Amino acid sequence: MTSLGPAPGGTPYVVDSATDASAGACPELLWVLAATPGGTASSPWHVLFFDHDGYLGTATAKATSYTTVVGSGDRDVRVQYRWLEGRDANCCPSGGPVVITFTLAGDDRTVTPSPAIPDQVG
């Protein structure tokens, strides 16, 4: 988590949620949703990916607001993004939602998004 750098306010990101596979199941692609301590939905979030050998990277280069993991399988994680449009209040993003499926490639080290992450996400 420290490799993400500080969250707004200078404190480290904290784990909000993580892979919740049923007992006995251990997916090939694991995830952690990292939150800004004391933040809200509009605060920056990171989705981190791991395999059985360790850390693979983040879903996006920069932390994004309104980010939620909505599902996962053995080799994929589905992330929903929303974003502010025009004069939206922080409470009410009208952009999206879009669900991006991140899939672990055959090399077991590369995670690929589909469809492409919209520019509005950041």
Image (tube, grey):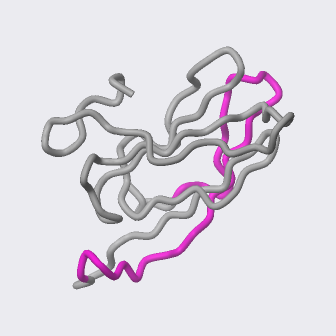
Residue 4 falls in image quadrant: top left
Q: Is residue 48 left or right of residue 3?
A: right
- Examine the image and state in which quarter residue 69 appears: bottom right
Q: Residue at x 79, y 35 (%)?
A: 27
**The C terminus - image quarter:** bottom left
Say if the magenta span includes residue 107.
Answer: yes
Residue drawn at the location 68% of the way across and 45% of the way down: 20
Extreme-left residue of the structure: 9
x, y percent for residue 18: 58, 43
Residue visible at 38% across and 50% down? Answer: 45
Q: Position of residue 52 (x, y in %)?
A: 71, 20
Total number of numbered discs in the rendering? 0
Q: Which residue reaches farthest right? A: 24
Residue in front for this viewpoint, 26 or 106 = 26
Expressed as whole percent of the image width and height from the top left, the position of residue 1 reads: 39, 28
Looking at the image, which residue is at 61% across and 18% down? 54
In the shown orientation, is residue 98 left or right of residue 12? Answer: right
Q: Return the residue nearer the eye: 108 or 35.
A: 35
- Magenta span contains residue 111: yes
- When the figure is inspected, residue 100 is found, relative to residue 7, above or below; the finding is below
Query: Looking at this rendering, what residue extends furthest in the top direction?
Result: 53
On the rendered structure, is 32 left or right of 13? right
Q: Is residue 114 above or below residue 34?
A: below
> Which range is magenta?
89-117
Which x, y percent locates residue 3? 35, 23
Q: Is residue 36 above or below residue 71?
A: above
| Residue 85 vertical placement versus 113 (above, below) | below
Residue nearest the observer in this picture, 120 or 48: 48
